[in-house]
Image (cartoon, rainbow, N blue to C red):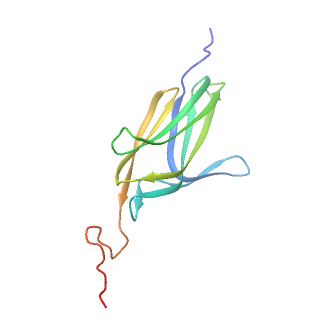
Amino acid sequence: MEATRILPDLQASLLCEEVRQEVNGNLFLIGVINFIRVPQLPIVAARLCIFNRWTAGIGQFTETVRLIAPDQTTVISKSEMKFELRDPALSATGVMVFGQVEFKTAGTYFVEVLVDDVMKLRYPVPVVHVPPPGQNPQNPPEEKKA
C-alpha cells in the first residue's frame, strides 16, 4: 500500500530582507537577519521575507507563518500559502513577504512556522534599540537657549 499523505519536514527557515530568483531558477537570499537593530521605537519594517523549504512529504498542505510579539501571544503579522509535494524526494520552497510590520517595543519577537496547524519551528528574533551615536535614550538632547 502506497502512502497518500505524509506531513513534510521543514528543511530550512530563514528571515531575510529579500529573496530573488536568478534566470536559472535558483533563489538567493539577501540580508539574512539574526536580530533587528533599530534607532527608535516604535518602527515599521517596510519588508521582511521568510524563506521556507519543505521536503520528505506527500500531499497538499497549508503553510502558516506568524510573527509573534514579545508577550508571546500577540500575532503582529500572519500569512498562509498552499503547496504540494508529490514525492518525498522532492522539495517545495515558499517565500512569504511581510510588508509594513510594526515593532512597538524592543524585545524578543518570534517566527512560528506551521504546516496544517502543526508547529514545525519557532525561533527568536530579537529587536534591539540602539540609538544613533551621540544620543542617550534616557536623556534627550538639551535644547539650546538663545
- Going by the image, does 14 lie left or right of 85? left
Q: Work out whether 82 lies above or below 25.
A: above
Q: Is residue 112 above or below residue 117?
A: below
- Residue in view at x 47 percent, y 53 percent: 33
- Residue closest to the far top: 1
Q: Answer with the quarter of the image where residue 85 lies.
A: top right
How far across and how far down the image is residue 25, in percent?
Answer: 70, 46
The residue sitting at 58% across, 25% down in the picture is 57
In terms of depth relative to the viewer, which is nearer, 127 or 75? 75
Q: Residue at x 56, y 33 (%)?
A: 54
Considering every residue shown, the one lying at the far front of the view is: 146
Q: Is residue 3 left or right of residue 16?
A: right
Q: Of 74 and 57, which appears nearest the observer?
A: 74
The residue closer to the viewer here, 59 or 49, is 49
Between residue 56 and residue 14, name the one nearer to us. Answer: 14
Q: Quadrant of the C terminus?
A: bottom left
Q: Residue furthest left?
A: 138
Using residue 103 as the reference point, say whether residue 10 is left or right of it. Answer: right
Q: Position of residue 109 (x, y in %)?
A: 38, 46
Quarter of the image that includes the N terminus = top right
Q: Residue furthest bottom?
A: 146
Residue 96 image offset from top left, x and y in percent:
57, 43
Identify the residue shown where x is 45% and y is 52%: 102
Disc tally is 0
